[in-house]
Image: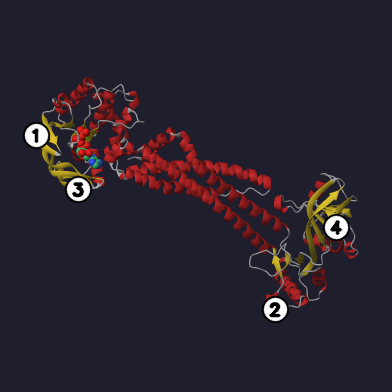
Amino acid sequence: MDFEETLSTSFEALILNKTRTALSVLGIVVGIASVIALITLGQGSQKAISDQIESLGSNLLTVMPGAQVMGSVRSYMGSVTTLTYEDAKAIAKSPQITAVEAVSAELIRNTQVVAGRANTNTMITGVMPAYAQIRKLEMESGVFISQRDLDSQTKVAVLGPQTVSDLFGEGTDPVGENIRINKINFRVVGVTESKGGGGFFNQDDVVFIPLTTAQKQVFGQDHVNTISIAAKNEELMEQAQNEVGYLLLTLHNLPEPEQADFSIMSQEDIIGAMTEVTSTFTALLSGIAAISLLVGGIGIMNIMLVTVIERTREIGLRKALGAKKKDIVAQFLVESVILTGAGGLLGIILGTLISLALVKMIGVPWTFSFNSYLLASGVSAIIGIVFGFYPAYKASNLSPIEALRYE
Amino acid sequence: MLLQTDNITKTYQLDGIKVHALRGVSLGIEKGEFVAVMGPSGSGKSTLMHILGALDTPTSGSYFLEGKDVSQASDEALSEVRNQKIGFVFQAYNLLPRATALKNVITPLIYAGVGKKERVRRAKEVLISVGLGDRLENRPNQLSGGEIQRVAIARALVTNPSVILADEPTGNLDTKSGDELMKILQGLNESGHTIIVVTHEAYIAEYAKRIIHLRDGEVVDGL
Ligand SMILES: Nc1ncnc2c1ncn2[C@@H]1O[C@H](COP(=O)(O)OP(=O)(O)OP(=O)(O)O)[C@@H](O)[C@H]1O
Ligand SMILES: [Mg+2]
C-alpha cells in the first residue's frame, strides 16, 4: 500500500477527532517543551558561570578551607574554619614564595545594608587591598580599601554598582555618604566599575570593607572564607600552587600533603566543579522531563488502543478487501507517529518560548542547542513508534470475520 | 472447476461446547456459474461463504481455488487471495464510513498496488457501470441502501476477481431495490462473472441458475 494513501487516511482519522487528538498530544507537548527549556537553561547557566569565572583572570588561584573532595566545592561557603588572616599575611611575606604576585584573604557574609530609608541584602566582603589587583577591579570613583584601613580597622566601604543603585539610585555618586551594616556606620569611599553578569552570579551586587573590620567589628570571626592569590603569570600557576601548598602545610603543622585542611583551586578547577554541579542539576531535571515524556507516551498508547477498538469493523473490512498485517500496522503506526511528531514540534516551539522567557528572567545567556532539538524530535518520533506499536500490532491481528461481526 | 471444496468442516468452540457449523461440505463450482445458497438460519451459509472467500479456513478438509489449495494458506497469502481473486458484498457495514464512494471502490486497488491514475480510472468505470456515475463523491451517509450495495458491487468488481461472493446482499433492501441489485448481478453473470449469492428469499434465488440447499451444516440439495 502506498505511503501517500496511508498518510492521508491517517490525517483524515485524526482530524475527525480533533479534541481527542489535541488532548492526546498534550502530554508529549509538555514533555518535549520541558526538555527543551531545561537543556537551554542548563547550558545557559553553565555558560554564565564559566564566563564569570573566566573574567576573573587566568592567573588566579583560590585557597579554600577544608580538604579537597574530587570535583566538589562543598566546602566553599561551608563551616570549615581552617584559613586565617595570618595565613594570607604569611604567604605575602614568606621568602620561599616566589611565584606569587598578590594575596588577599576574604570573609564573606550575606547581610542587610541600610542607607537612609533604603536597604538591600548583599554580599559583605571583607578584603585586603590586593583584592582589587587580583580580581582586576577598576574604580568608578573614589578609592579602594587601603593598607591603612586594614591596619587600623577603619569603617569604610567600597560599593559595587548594583549596590549603589539599590541604595542610592542609579547614576548617583555615594562617595562620602554613610551606610549601616549590622547597625555600624560605614563611610563610602569608593565605587567599583561594573564587572557585568546578572542573576545568580552578579559580581556588582557587593560591599567591600576592610577584612580586619569585618572580622573584629562586624561579624566577630577569626577565620576567612577564601584566600585569593594572583600568580606572577600563567606559566607559574603550578609553582605558585606548590609553594603556597607547602607553606600552608607547615603553618598548619601538617607533615603530609594528604592531611591538608585546605584546597587550592585554579579557575579551571572551579569551572569544572561548577559545571559538574549544574550538569547534575540538569540531568536531574531532564530525568523528570523524561518521566513526563513517558507519561505522554502512555497517553498516546491509550488513545491509540481506543481508536483501534473503535475502528474494529473498519479494520475487518480493510482486511477483507486484501489489506495485509503490515498495511494495518503501518496505518496505525503512522497515525501515532503523526501524533507524537506534531506534539514534538509544538513542544519544541513552546519550549523555545519558555526558555527565552526564563533566560531573560534569570539573566543567563540564551544558547541555541541544535542537539537538544534533534534529541527532542528523535525522542518524540521514537515515542510514537514504541507506544504506537502495541495498538497497531493488536489491530493487525484482528481476524477479519471477528472484526466484521464486532458490534 | 473454478472452486472446489473437499469434505470441509468448521467447528467452533463456544464456552467449551463444540458447534459444528459445517459437517463435511463437498461441492464444485464452474467458471461462469450463478449459484444461490439457501437454507434456514444457522445452517452454515455464512460460514461456508467465509471459507470460500478466504476470510476463514476450514477445521478440516481442503478448498481449491483455481486449482490452488487455500485451506491451509498463511494469513499473508489469504490477504492476497481476497484481494485478487475474491469480490465481497456483505449484508451490512459494507463501506468505509468516512470515505466517498469513489474512495471505497479504490481501496482494494490500493492494496493491490495499482498506480494512482489507473485505480481512479478503473474505479470510475465500474461505478458508472453500476449506474452511480453521479454519486462518486458521496459518502455512505449520503447514499441510499440500494446505492450502498451497488457501490459494494462496484468495489467487488473493480479488481476483476475470479468470483463474486454476496452474503445476503439484499437483506436490508426492499423488493424493488433488491430486484435492481439482482439484475446488476445477473448482467455481470451474463458477461462472464462467476457469482455466489446467499439468500433467504425465493424470488432472489430465482435469478440464479443453480440453488444449493444447506441444512445443519450439510448440503442437502443442489450438487
Ligand atoms: N464465531 C462463532 N463462534 C461460535 N459459533 C459460531 C460462530 N460463527 C457461527 N457460529 C455458529 O455456526 C452456525 C452456523 O452459523 P452461520 O453464521 O454460518 O449461519 P447462517 O446460515 O449464515 O445463518 P443466518 O441465515 O442466520 O445468517 C450457527 O449455529 C452459529 O451459531
Ligand atoms: Mg449468515
Q: Quadrant of residue A330?
A: top left
Q: Write the residue at 38% across / 45% down.
A: A391
Tell me where residue A389 appears, x and y as whole percent.
39, 47
| Mark 1 within 8 Å of ligand 1, using the beta carbon | no
Q: Are marks 1 and 3 on the same chain?
A: yes
Identify the residue under disc 1: B221
Is disc 1 placed on a helix, strand or loop? strand
Which is in the foreground here, disc 4 or disc 3?
3
CA separation in Å, label 1 and label 2: 110 Å
Q: Which residue is mark 2?
A: A256
Q: Are marks 1 and 2 on the same chain?
A: no
Q: Which mark is residue B178?
A: none
The residue that mark 4 highlights is A144
Instruction: Give amino acid for label 1.
Output: Asp
A103 vs B185, left or right, is right
- Is disc 4 in the same subunit as disc 1? no
Q: Amino acid at mark 3?
A: Gln
A334 above or below B153? below
Residue under numbered circle 3: B72
| The quadrant where residue A171 appears | top right
